[in-house]
Amino acid sequence: MKTYLALLRAINVGGNAKVAMADLKALLADLGYADPQSLLQTGNLVFQAKESSSDKLEAKLETAIAERLGLTTDVLIRTAAEWQQAIAANPFPKEAASDPSHLLIMPLKNAPTKKAVKELQTAIHGRETVAAVGRELYIIYPDGIGRSKLTNKLIETRLATRGTGRNWNTALKLAELAITHEG
């Protein structure tokens, strides 16, 4: 069995798309996945499964969540090893150490092209900085996310893919949880 992370997009944020983590964990257990655990209330799940295709697992979970919980949302899957690689590939280690709550990692459905990333960088009118490594986008929001003009909609439009962001503190906690699953 492999350890997987499932990151749900835009749930329990601003009162939208509310779902209890207990319901998500129960759904994973009902689907036959081992030891489902959640972190925080924003759709962070860690579990074990026999599946070897992240794409198929994403589709299966998106369908099950829609059918059983009435919630349509993107699910982004990473193996524990992929998540560790994403943590290690962070192009902003200084910010990760000094201001982790303003550094986001955004797993994406598909890796953006270099051209798309350049277009996104050009579209930024504030002090935000972005860099992409594979299927992950790293974003520094030095003035906070709440007032930033660098929104998910702008990011997803420019990159032509969907994603969900987690601040660096949450990303590290997910990595720890995934490691305990594998042990």
Image (tube, rainbow, N blue to C red):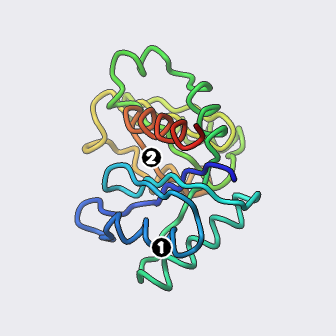
Q: Is residue 72 or residue 177 the one in the foreground?
A: 177
Q: Is residue 29 above or below residue 151?
A: below
Q: Amino acid at mark 2?
A: Gly
Question: SS of the residue at dot 2?
Answer: loop
Relative to 33, is 142 on the left or the right? left
Question: SS of the residue at dot 1?
Answer: helix
Q: Is residue 103 or residue 80 the one in the foreground?
A: 80
Q: Position of residue 103 (x, y in %)?
A: 40, 31
Q: Is residue 58 or residue 33 the one in the foreground?
A: 33
Tell me if mark 2 has few (under 14), some (14-19) or many (20+) residues whose alpha carbon lies within 10 angstroms of its own.
many
Q: Quadrant of residue 58?
A: bottom right
N-term mark: 2 or 1:
1
Q: Position of residue 82 (x, y in %)?
A: 66, 40
- Residue furthest to the front in view is 183
Quadrant in which the C terminus is drawn: top right
* Residue at (45, 37) in percent of width and height: 171
Q: Amino acid at mark 1?
A: Leu
**In front: label 2 or label 1:** 1
Badge 2 is on which residue?
165
Q: Quadrant of residue 160?
A: bottom right
Badge 1 is on which residue?
27
Q: Is residue 154 above or below residue 135?
A: below
